[in-house]
Image: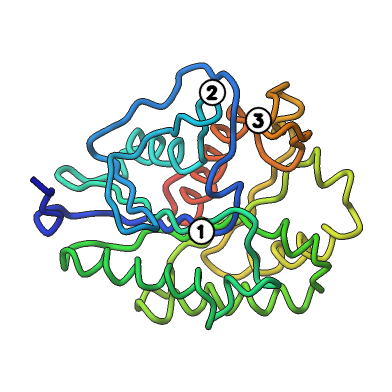
Amino acid sequence: MMKDFSKETFDILIQAGQSNSEGYGFGNVCGPYQPDERVWYFNGDGTFQVAQEKVANNGVQSNFSLTFARKYIESGMLAEGRKLLILRTAVGGTGFSDNHWKSTDDLYLRMMDMIRESLALNPENRLKALLWHQGETDACNKMTYDYYRGHLSALVESVRGTFGVPELPFIAGDFVQDWENDNKEICAPIIAALREVCKSPFSAFVETDGLDSNRQDGYPHPLGWTDSIHFCRRAIYALGERYFAAYAAIVGKE
């Protein structure tokens, strides 16, 4: 029987952007994430499932929302009787420059529909954060600082304004340093724009120093290419904890 989500009350996290948000972290970790009936995914195909790591390419593939969720619960932020719903809106290899995240584009519109649907499940559901990791595609397409900053600012303000949450925390992060160090010229305008947007109220920028790529972790890419652009699984876990620390600082619960 299909679960009746109208009888559940959710704190809602929007996880948006491209592949490092969707999650391509491989490798071994200490204390792997254990599925928790209090933490659910709302997937882009309209399905719901208990949040969990994905088994793919002969390994476990992870994303940063899981350790964010674990810290959210451990910190006591999830009230008794409520659950956490993670909107999985991110898609790898997408950006503003290739017409996926601007206000008339497919992934932006799908994200907004998913937010509407999740809020409509129960009048007690509440948006808690917009977690964004994206920009590698736009760096490769040599998007300018002004272009990226303008579109990202518009996206954040659109979510806050449309759903009446002007203080909704927005958190974004830096790229994998392994890849960024090899592509500094094209990355610089995007990272500068991300940092500028994150200077606005109720926003934060997460540094990624010390977080290894799949290449640095030694994970062999299933398609044979050297993967320096994606955080490894250990780094993804740490990234989720850094995103949560930034969130806790915004809401005053450090």
Choose top left, top right, bottom left or bottom right for residue 36. Answer: top left
Residue at screen point 82% across, 47% down: 180
The image's mark for residue 58 is: 2
Give the total number of marks visible in the rendering. Answer: 3
In percent of width and height, residue 30 lies at: 51, 16
The image's mark for residue 16 is: 1
Q: Is residue 2 above or below residue 219?
A: below
Residue at screen point 64% across, 77% down: 151
In the shown orientation, is residue 4 left or right of residue 53?
A: left
Secondary structure under badge 3?
loop
Secondary structure under badge 1?
strand
| Label 2, label 3: how far apart the Cα atoms are | 9 Å
Q: Are circles 3 and 1 on residues that touch, CB within 8 Å?
A: no
In the shown orientation, is residue 148 left or right of residue 82?
A: right
Local packing at callout 2 (Cα closer than 10 Å; few below 14, some 14-19, many 20+) is few
Q: Which residue is mark 3?
A: 222
The three-letter amino acid code for the residue at tag 1 is: Ala
Q: Are circles 2 and 3 on residues that touch, CB within 8 Å?
A: yes
Mark 3 or 1 closer to N-term? 1
Q: Is residue 118 above or below residue 55?
A: below
Q: Is residue 33 above or below residue 254?
A: above
The image's mark for residue 113 is: none
Secondary structure under badge 2?
loop
| Label 3, label 1: how far apart the Cα atoms are | 25 Å
The three-letter amino acid code for the residue at tag 3 is: Pro
The image quadrant where one finds the N terminus is top left
